[in-house]
Image: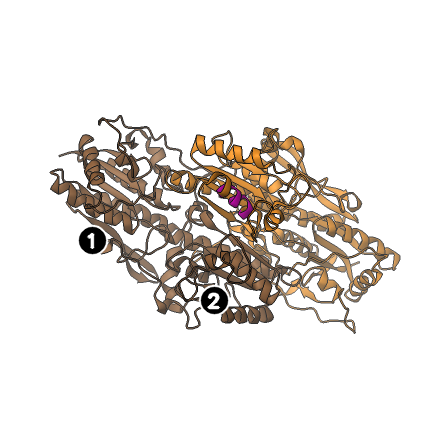
Chain colours: A orange, B brown
């Protein structure tokens, strides 16, 4: 039996989520005997609810191939979490109705923990509504917080970007420290877990090398310990590089970014945690500072993606389709680490029910005893994930990123579906 | 007659200033019959004043070669402006004393306008003190504000970084706009001139492509025009990418960054101009926003340097030495544009007196009539400067940047020199 497939991107995009899309579509095209067209959801799952589907079969092979080196979400992603089936059965019923109307027998959902939960639910509701759909989750998150899988596609490239940026900015600050900036602060993503902040630690090791201090969400911010470490570092090295996670927080759980806005340090301000730390350094130590906020640049920097990450992102997309064709259902391909050095990995699988809505935090054993740097164990885990480069092609000095046509599929249902 | 040479880096460093150092040292080594050792100033000109010289002759050829792909200032740079000879004759006399003690007959000063002025003065004071020194300036500034030369080494790589980052972040924002961030703001350097902000314009063209709005220091900020353009853009495209120069200002000359701090928009804050613009967007239009502050990352991002920029940085270092050996004095090598497309350039020269303390602003003809984007003429000027890639070598996922030993030269003078 030949059926169509539906692919949707979910949540914050990454520099390699389109590599997963590429893996799904190219693999489906190789199995034209069993999979008809691959439809993509315009703006992710919203496209399924509103019957706004993109027909990827009209894209030439070269465009699909170029997705492998294109950042962002080519078909649009969405922050849209479905409620439980009990609370909002209409959404699930609608999705199955759209799938039925377009003869969609395969659902590939590319996202984080919430998305795995949704894929899991769609798999069971389809069966109970008499239209069974093979549902495969495809892992994606820069936050690296999915359980079971060794790491998440998207994370390695952010990790590489952050490690390289820390290294480069540190060389800059070091060379100017005699007469200019003493303290440089880099704010990175990771509201709940310090994986990205930890990756900056790959830039150097030992007390004289940047980053000199990392502020993790997992370690409550200790104002006096922090200030004394900054002072020591500037005294010894003439400069200090601090990497701070956007999720850094006080012992009571308040985000430092909010603490600053609420004047906890006597400085009213709006902005991220970097400016809070900067204000503290200035008022308590009087050092000249600069800060950078990488924000979306870090998760879209396809120009410096990790080759390993690109390969894994493609592989989980490819295997998702292959697993579906092998009769698997309600699972997610995982990355299995087989050796640290030389790094070897393979693709495994896990039941969606085991990954949905569970967050993997940075283990305490990955953070040094003093709370300001990473351990050798953490380094061993992280180092292979930033391995290799995978440069996009360039023309006239700029990357040639894919521009898919994203042609709509004609609607077959009548009536609009109102999103919540 | 064989004499030693002195090389110093000055002001804010760039991702290619060490490529100029590489050009100077490699070329001097090829002329060992006329140039003895190349000494570098530790922390730039401060090293000359305090007799803190680095002996580059102890570095292996491989380390010097690696400077070509290493960001930051390998020997240390300084923000230290010498006063006029009349105001501070002791500084100039001291420098000549140090040069005499170490038999330094060549002074290569790698910096911006102030440094060209200093090199010019040293050339005349040396003569009047009976120790003539051949003084050659080597252009360097990410701000691209030196006159006469077509462009400044350092600028092309920042321009490339900013154009690529804008393109990548725009793809990210575009894909999430339906349910998440509508307005993304990228703050870039350029306190006095909008060259770097202008470079973001290379990321796209036409009203639907990012960057949708650029805020230049040259155009007084028009609050209502800005807000109305952002609103139109979000209405039409569902998102809006704004690139703002740190030097963006009000009609009265106040920097927007300071205006924000002083509550001009009703929001007390500390931080850069990006947060001021973000607060304005939020309070007046209510859109969800994100902002990135590239800060030092943009000028140290050697991993994505423009090949043209690296080649030009090396060439001005090489030609500085060759000009000196040809008997030139008190000049600066310049980059001469011979054709836009295909781009051709050569190295010329200009008297230091003609470049010292003159700033080249972004011409009004490079900014669109409405003040929010760049013109075709600007694009024609900028496009070749970001041409080509020049990737550093990598090991274990990280760039292999040079780590020179920076061995000190034994002091020959007695007594300390007190810096102002």
Q: Label 2 vs label 1: CA separation?
A: 39 Å
Reply yes or no: does residue A281 show up in magenta. yes
Viewer-side residue, A249 vs B331: A249
Q: Toward which corner of the image does residue B48 lie, by quadrant?
A: top left
Q: Give the labeled residue for mark 1.
A: B353
Q: Chain of mark 1?
A: B
Q: Which residues are magenta?
A: A275-282
Majority secondary structure in the magenta region: helix
Q: Give the labeled residue for mark 2.
A: B205
Secondary structure state at the residue bearing disc 1: helix
Viewer-side residue, A126 vs B171: B171
Q: In this rendering, does residue B251 appear at all?
A: yes
- Residue drawn at 34 percent across, 31 percent down: B406
Disc assigned to residue B142 = none
Counting other residues with Cα less than 10 Å from the Cα at mark 2, is it few (<14), some (14-19), or many (20 or more)?
Answer: some
First of labels 2, 1 by sequence position: 2
Q: Residue A74 at what x, y percent from top left? A: 61, 59
Give the position of the N terminus of chain B as an image quadrant: top left
Viewer-side residue, A210 vs A327: A210
């Amino acid at each position: 039996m030949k059926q169509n497939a539906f692919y949707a991107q979910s949540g914050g995009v990454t520099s390699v989520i389109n590599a997963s899309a590429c893996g799904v579509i190219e693999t489906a095209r190789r199995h034209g005997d069993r999979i008809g067209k691959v439809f993509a959801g315009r703006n992710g799952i919203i496209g399924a609810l509103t019957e706004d589907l993109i027909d990827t079969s009209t894209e030439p092979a070269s465009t699909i191939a170029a997705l492998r080196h294109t950042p962002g979400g080519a078909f649009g992603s969405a922050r849209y979490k479905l409620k439980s089936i009990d609370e909002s059965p209409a959404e699930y019923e609608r999705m199955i109705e759209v799938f039925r109307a377009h003869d969609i027998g395969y659902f590939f959902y590319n996202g984080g923990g919430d998305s795995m939960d949704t894929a899991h639910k769609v798999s069971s509701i389809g069966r109970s509504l008499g239209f069974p759909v093979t549902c495969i989750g495809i892992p994606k998150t820069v936050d690296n917080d999915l359980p079971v899988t060794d790491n998440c596609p998207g994370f390695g490239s952010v990790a590489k970007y952050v490690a390289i940026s820390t290294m480069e900015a540190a060389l800059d600050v070091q060379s100017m420290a005699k007469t200019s900036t003493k303290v440089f602060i880099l704010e990175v993503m990771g509201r709940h877990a310090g994986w990205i902040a930890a990756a900056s630690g790959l830039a150097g090791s030992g007390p004289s090398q940047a980053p000199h201090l990392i502020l993790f969400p997992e370690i409550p911010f200790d104002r006096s310990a922090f200030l004394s470490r900054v002072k020591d570092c500037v005294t010894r090295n003439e400069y200090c590089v601090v990497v701070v996670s956007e999720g850094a927080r006080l012992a009571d759980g308040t985000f430092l970014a909010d603490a600053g806005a609420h004047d906890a340090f006597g400085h009213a301000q709006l902005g991220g945690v970097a400016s809070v730390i900067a204000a503290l350094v200035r008022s308590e130590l009087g050092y000249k500072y600069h800060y950078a906020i990488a924000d979306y640049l870090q998760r879209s920097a396809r120009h410096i993606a990790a080759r390993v990450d690109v390969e894994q992102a493609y592989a989980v997309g490819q295997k998702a389709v292959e697993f579906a064709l092998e009769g698997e259902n309600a699972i997610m391909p995982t990355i299995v680490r087989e050796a640290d050095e030389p790094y070897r990995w393979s693709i495994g699988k896990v039941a969606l029910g085991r990954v949905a809505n569970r967050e993997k935090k940075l283990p305490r054993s990955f953070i040094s005893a003093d709370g300001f740097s990473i351990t050798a164990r953490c380094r061993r885990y992280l180092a292979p994930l930033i391995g290799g480069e995978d440069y996009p092609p360039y023309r006239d000095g700029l990357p040639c990123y894919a521009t898919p046509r994203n042609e709509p599929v004609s609607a077959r249902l009548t009536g609009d579906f109102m999103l919540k």
